[in-house]
Image: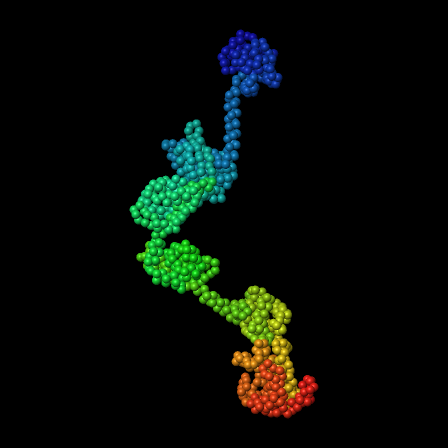
Amino acid sequence: MSDHLESLFTALLNNTPDLQVYFCDTQYRYIAFNQKHKEAVKQIWGTDIEVGMSLLDAITIEQDRVLIKFDYDRALKGETFTLIKQYADSDLANIYLERTLTPIKDEQGSIIGFIASARNITSSVQQSLDLKNSERLLELFFKQSLCGSFFMMLKDPVEWNDSVDKDAVLEYVFDNQFVTKANQAYLDQYGLTFNEHRILTPRVMFSHDLAQGKAAWKQLFDQGMVHIDTQELKADGTKIDIEGDYICLYDEQGRITGHFGTQQDITQRRQTESDLKQSHELMRTVIENDRGAVALFDQDMCYIYVSQRYLTLFKIEDPNIIGKSHYDVFPNLNHYYKQVHQRALAGQVERNDKDLFTHPDGSQIYIKWEVRPWTKNENQVGGIILYIEDITQEVQMQEKLLKQGNQLNAMFEQAAVGFVIGPLTGNYARVNQKFCDIVGYSSDELLKMTFRDITHPDDLNIDNLQTQRLINHQDTTFSTEKRYIRKDKSIVWVHITVSLLDPSSFDVPHVVVVSEDITSRKLAEEKMHYLSYHDQLTGLYNRRFYEEELRRLDHPRNYPLALIIGDINGLKLINDAFGHAMGDVLIQTVANTIKDICRKDEIIARIGGDEFVILLPKTQEQTATTIIERINRILSHEKIGEINLSIATGYGIKTSADEKTDEIFKQAEDSMYRQKLADSSSIMSKTIDIIMKSLYEKSPREMLHSKRVSELSTLIAKALKFDKSEINKIRATGLMHDIGKIGISDTVLNKPLPLSIVDQRDIERHSEVGYRILSAVNEFSEIAEFVLSHHEHWDGNGYPKKLKGKTIPIQSRIIAVADAYDAMTTDSIYMQIRSEDEAVSELIRCASTQFDPEIVYVFIERVLPKLSKTKDTPQDLFSLIP
């Protein structure tokens, strides 16, 4: 090695205390090295090196040896380079070396070795790794933070100090600052993506309130960091409240380059706080406006809250008593109240409805109070609530009323109407027994109530309006009808008169209320209203309602409008024969049948005694005829006793506005009468048969009597040379002459003489009843006249018309003789049986007074002889007629 190289090596070795420096020949043998390198090899591989020793032999780790030889070979090939290698020392701690390798050449340019320098950069590398790890953690926090985090950077830094125009700077900032980095929580607050947000400037973001935005930026730039609340807008225009912490970012010259911020959406929290505040204010308002005084205490009986009314009621001049002990405020408080407080703190509820309290100045008031515990977490008693109401006026008023004397008290208590006295808007102060009876509450219960507690909800609005007029002095009294809800929940109608009492006697307006129970009248009015539109017997609508509905439904939208009319067959006959009670049953049965067949929304009305009508809007003819068929089919299976039900029906259809409803009604009525005429004879005859059958079932004696009278009358008619037609009429008249007795009760009909005047009148009516029954049937109308007069007397003293002589139909005169003879000669409950001679003598005696003398003569001379000849040979009397 030349002297020049040696001096160079020596200089390097002695002047590089912080570097490892070593020289090796082409065989990797040390030529020279400094102390720093020797220490490093010892630390890393545990080898003490010497000059001439192979560097590769000093490396005790095979992997290191291979890699390092590769690097040295590059230098021996003429390459100069720098690299960083990681090693582990004997303690397995990582060591990072930055190594530079340079080939060494002789004067001819041949490589004779290499020179290496190495610097321990472990500290720098570790710092770099720590920085990267911190950046990674920061990025993870930034992305996953629940708070919105962002960087907002300026295009160019700005100066911010007193020497610049700050307003101008803000104008620049509001057009040149953009979000450069933001986490998802921040973007969600505005409902934007990053690409949508990164183009927005502060001017756009605060376009709804530019002044607010500039004030926030100015505060941030002035202070460098700020905690501030702002109201901003989401992408959809929704207002949001933002709470944020922001810090300015600066460059080396102290200029502002942007700012970093974390923020959260506190809109819901603000709304909750607002609602809670409003709730507290509402509670405070309610407490302060309540007529009672309220105080809240902790467990040590120190004030937490007091209402203004409490301070006024107890004459507390110092309003700042929160935190003070109740016993300091009232040092002479009665021991009784202290015991009450202790029991309440132990969990009990204490109350007193009338307590006399004495103020420190000696004045007294009557109070009603309640003390109850209030609880905090885990149901622990936190203190007590004291509610006090000044009832001095009520007590004094009661005392004044009591002083009015027993007479006034008796008048009040024993009045036939309800009396109430009390404040306009407060609880009743006094009620009498009649009022208690009206509403069903006791006096004690009512004194805890107001008129609103018992008034029907539908009547409260009028009550409130009238009460307000009294309060406003627009009226001094009013009367109205209203409903109370009794304790048993039933409704009672009352007529009330409310009058203001003398205001000088009370601090607040008081009234006296007089209440009269008008429930019976109201029910009667409701019944009258019901009956004004309903038939009382059937519950169907009546003619008035039918006519109003017909006018209402007479509109093209309801066409075709069908109208069905029905008339009960034989109703008059049934009424005459069996009485109106049975007729009513008949009407009700027909009405119920029609109701069952028709729909509930169809109009069914009874417009006459036996006449019904059905209104069917939007109904075709086929539907109307189907309904009629169903009515007739169902009624054909219905009976009242032995009487089959039937109804004559007809219908009309209105299809256009040009047709008159009167014509449609007449069309239906004509159709009904045609059916009635077709069916009437058969139905009436059947009814007559049923009536006779019913009469005979009531009294078998009447059956035998009617048959004998018919036979005797026929013999008389034959003796008088009547033609066959007239004889048949006489025969039928005899059979049915007592048909009117169907309307007489069994008791009277079978009652022995003497009859009472009332019973006698019932018996005498049978001829009229018989006439009405038979005249209802065309084929019996002539016979009806004979039946009517069969109790008329020749001298005009009979009944029912007092006819005389030959004005009495001859058929009636014949029946009278036959009827009298049979009554005298057969067993009867009315009289003792007589012999033939006695009967003849009676007929002769009554000839020219009761009976037609000519008919008596014919009966005695021509009929009786024939009867006498057959006396011992029982046979049908009709066999005696030639």
Residue under the image location 42 percent in, 42 percent down? 345
Quarter placement of the N terminus: top right
Quadrant containing the C terminus is bottom right
Q: Residue furthest left?
A: 361
**Residue 68 position by quadrant:** top right
Question: Which is nearer the eye, 244 or 200?
Answer: 244
In this rendering, the answer to whether 547 lies above or below 458 is below
Give x and y (percent) for residue 680.
62, 77
Q: Quadrant of residue 217?
A: top left
Q: Is residue 647 above or below residue 838?
A: above
**In this picture, residue 682 sits left or right of residue 266:** right
Percent of width and height locating residue 31: 56, 10
Colouring method of the image: rainbow
Q: Let me know if residue 296 appears in the view.
A: no
Is 824 on the left or on the right of 502, as rendered?
right
Q: In this rendering, would 106 be left or right of 311? A: right
Image x and y of residue 150, in percent: 48, 35
Determine the residue positioned at 52% across, 34% down: 143
Which of 499 and 389 lies nearest the eye of the viewer?
A: 389
User: Which residue is painted at 50% across and 14% down in the image?
Assistant: 16
Would you identify the image quadrant in which residue 33 lies? top right
Q: How many marks?
A: 0
Residue 500 is situated, as x and y percent measured from the top left of the image, at 35, 59
Residue furthest to the top in view is 3
Q: Nearer the viewer, residue 760 or 295?
A: 760
Residue 571 seen in render: yes
Q: Nearer the viewer, residue 584 or 58?
A: 584
